[in-house]
Image (spheres, rainbow, N blue to C red):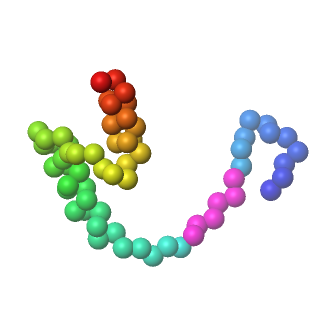
């Protein structure tokens, strides 16, 4: 849909894509997240986590 003028309005074409998935893992994962956030122990770093790698490198540099 090409318009001649902007006129303070943006129009989008909307398409829905059907997707069938399995969300059985969501509830258990949310409960684990809640338990982690409410806990007194900080979890260890993840090997595949870019943020963890940055944080570790930063801490090593500062020490």
Q: Which residue is depicted at the point 28% across and 67% down?
A: 25
Q: Among all residues in the image, which is located at the extreme top? A: 62
Query: Horizontal and vertical percent for residue 27?
Result: 25, 62
Left or right of 12? Residue 22 is left
**How many circles with numbers are drawn on the protein?**
0
Quadrant into which the C terminus falls: top left
Magenta span covers which residues? 12-17
Q: Which residue is depicted at the point 32% across and 30% down?
A: 59
Query: Horizontal and vertical percent for residue 3?
Result: 84, 48
Is residue 49 located in the magenta-colored stretch of the structure? no
The relative height of residue 16 versus residue 9 in the rendered view (above or below) is below
The relative height of residue 37 versus residue 60 in the rendered view (above or below) is below
Could you say which is closer to the camera, residue 40 or residue 50? Answer: 50
Give the dominant element type of the magenta stretch: helix, strand or loop.
loop
Q: Which residue is depicted at the point 37% across and 35% down?
A: 57
Q: Which residue is depicted at the point 33% across and 51% down?
A: 47
């Amino acid at each position: 849909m090409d318009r001649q003028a902007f006129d303070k309005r943006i129009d989008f074409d909307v398409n829905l894509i059907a997707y069938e998935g399995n969300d059985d893992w969501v509830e258990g994962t949310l409960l684990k997240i809640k338990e982690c956030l409410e806990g007194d122990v900080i979890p260890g770093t993840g090997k595949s986590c870019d943020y963890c790698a940055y944080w570790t490198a930063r801490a090593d540099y500062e020490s």
